[in-house]
Image (cartoon, rainbow, N blue to C red):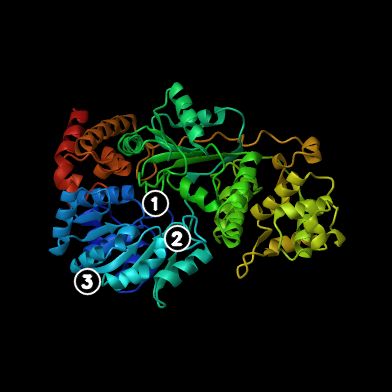
Amino acid sequence: MAADRSADPARLLREVFGYGAFRPGQADIIDAVMAGHDVLAVMPTGAGKSLCFQIPALASPGLTVVVSPLIALMRDQVSQLRANGIAAAALNSGNSPSEDREITAALRSRQIKLAYVAPERLVRTDTQNLLREGGAWLMAIDEAHCVSQWGHDFRPEYRALRDLREACGIRQTLAVTATADAPTRNDIARLLLSHDHKSFLHSFDRPNLRLAMAQRRAGNSQLLARLAQHKGQSGIIYAASRRGVEDLASDLRGHGYQALPYHAGMDQTRRSDNQDIFLREDGIVMVATLAFGMGIDKPDVRFVLHANLPSSIEAYYQEIGRAGRDGLPADTLTLYSPGDMQLRRRQIAEADSDEVRKRIDHRKLEALIALCETPRCRRQTLLAAFGESAQPCGNCDVCAGGFTLVDGTLMARKAMSAIMRTEGRFFAAHLAKLLKGQTTEAMTRHGHDQLPTFGIGRDLTEEEWRSVFTQLHGAGLVRHDTDDRDRLVLTSTGRAVLKGESAVQFRNSSLQGKLRRRAPAMAEGMETSPVPAAAVEISMDGQRLSVRQSSLLNALKARRAELARAQRVPAFVIFHDRTLIDMAVRAPLTQADFAQVHGVGAAKCAQFSETFINVIERASA
C-alpha cells in the first residue's frame, strides 16, 4: 500500500490546511515519499516538517504511524489534525481505558489516518498487531536524531525502530529532524532507512530569529531589560537549576510578569497545569530548566532567553528554535559566564558515560563556547557548526556592532602553531598550558615541553588562551576533521593567517589582560543599535498593522482564547497568530472570503467562520 501518486498535494494543502503554497523544500520531500522512497528530511524548526508526512497520509488509503517521543507533542498534534477534519489518534499512557477502546475500534475498522505512538509503546506485540490490522504503510519518525549517540537527545529505544517497522507490516520510512550534523545523519540513514533512500538537507538558518549573547552580570537586570521589549508576548526563559527557576519566576512576578516555573522537581500536576496555561494563554513567560521544551509546538513564542549557558551547540539551537515557529520576528538572548563553562565541563567529566560520549559532548560544548565568543556574525558561526556557510546576517548583536575588535593575528598564529605541532589531538585546556609553559605530567609524557611553542604565550592567562582557541573556532580558522572528529585541522583561512598572508580580529571583551588595558571594550553584549522589539503585529506582506487592524486583532485573539478554553485545547489549535493577523487585514464578512484567509481549511471554515465574522462585524460597526 502506498500513497496515491495521482493525488494533488497542493489541493490537499489548500483545502485541508488552508495554505496557498508549500514552504521551501516541502514539495520535494512529499513527492519522494509519495513515490515510495525511504526519506531523510533535515529541516529547521518552523519549516513545516509535519506536513511532509501528513499530506502523504491523506493521499493514502492506509495508516501512517508517527513515532513521537513525548505525550504532550502527540496530544497537540492530534488536536490540530482533528481541528482540520483529519482522523488522528495517539496511543500513549495518558489515554483513559475508554479512549484506548475507542481508538482500538477505530484502528481495526481502518478509520484512522495518522496514529501517534511512542517507541516504548511500539515494542508491545499487541500494538504492532493493532497497527498492522489498521493498514499501516508509512512510519514517520519525528526527532529522528534521537537514534544517534552523536545527537544531543540520544534514546536507545529508537534503534529498534527498523525491526519494529517490519513487525507492523510497514514498508516505508520518513525520518525527520531539525538538528543533525553529518555523523548524526549517517547514523539515521544506517539505522533507520534503506540503502537507496532519498536525503533532503535544508538550511539550518532561521532568519526571523535575532541572535544575541552576553556575559552575565549580577542580578536579573539584563533579562528584565529584554522582557520590557516583549510585554504581553509569550516566551521562555531557561535557567540551569530548579532553585534558579523558582527564584527567577518569583522575581519576574514581582515585576508584573505572568511568569510560571517548570522543572522536574515539581509536582506532576502543577507542572502539567503550568504547561497547559503556557500553551493556551497569551503573554505567559515560562521559566524552565531543560526539562521543558522538546515537543512543545506553540507557534507564537516571541522570545527565548537563557539565564545560563546551554549544554551544547545543538541544545542551544533546539531551544532558541522554539521561538518564532510561525515565521514572524522573534528574539533570543543567551547569558553566560566563565563559571557556566567550567560547570558544563565538569558535568561532562563526571557524567556516567563512556569516553567516546564524553569526547562528543566536549566538542559540542566547545562549539557553543566558540559561538559565545565569536568575533564574527553569530549566524555565520552557528551555521558553520552545522557545516553550512552564510554571509553576515545583519540580525545579531555582533552585526549590530556590539563588540570592540582588536588585532588577534599574532595570538592566532601562536595558537594554531600549537595545534599543528600536537597534530590536532588535544583540547584547549592542554594547549593553553603548553603556550603558558606549564610543566604537567601530560605535558612531559607527550614530550610537549620540548616543542618550540612551549612557553611562547606567557603574556596571556590560561583562560585568555582558552578564549583564543574558542575564537579560532568562531572565526572559522580551525574545525574538526570531517573523517576524524577527534582531530582539529586548520581551514584554508586559518592556513593563510598562519603563513602571514592574512590577518584576523578577536573580540577584546574576552581577553581581559593587557589587550583590554590597551583598548578598553564596551560592556559585553551592549549593542550600538537598539534591539528591535519582536512585534507580532506584522501583516503577511511584512507591513505593520494599522491602529484599526491591531484593535481587530486583539478582539480576534480574545475570541480565540474563549474558544480554546471552552474546548480545553491550546489557542493555536483554533488558529495560529498568522491566521488571525491575515484575518485582521482581510476583515472577511462572508464565508467565501473567510475561506481565503491563510490557515483556514474547509473544516475550520465550516466550524469557525460564523463566530469570527461576528467579531469582525462588531468591530466594523
**In the picture, residue 168 is in which quadrant?**
bottom left
Q: Marks 3 and 1, how far apart in space?
A: 27 Å
Do residues under tags 3 and 2 come within 8 Å of each other at their CB atoms? no
Q: Earlier in the sequence, mark 1 or mark 2?
A: 1
Residue 103 in picture, x, y percent from top left: 17, 56
Q: Nearer the viewer, mark 1 or mark 2?
A: 2
Given the current orientation, which residue lies at the most extreme bottom position?
196
The quadrant the C terminus occupies is top left
Image mark for residue 46: 1
| 620 to the left or right of 522 | left
Q: Secondary structure at mark 2?
A: helix
Q: Amino acid at mark 3?
A: Asp
Q: Between 129 and 76, which is closer to the camera in this rendering?
A: 129
Residue linked to disc 3 = 4
Q: Is residue 9 above or below residue 169?
A: above
Tag 2: amino acid? His
On screen, residue 517 versus residue 479, left or right, reads right
Front of the two marks 3 and 2: 2
Q: Earlier in the sequence, mark 3 or mark 1?
A: 3
The x, y position of residue 591, in whole percent, is 15, 44
Q: Secondary structure at mark 3?
A: loop
Please name the amino acid that badge 1 sits on. Gly
Q: Position of residue 92 (x, y in %)?
A: 27, 53
358 vs 78, nearest the viewer: 358
Q: Is residue 548 left or right of residue 183?
A: left
Which residue in the protein does label 2 denote? 145
Query: Distance of mark 3 from mark 2, alpha carbons?
Result: 29 Å
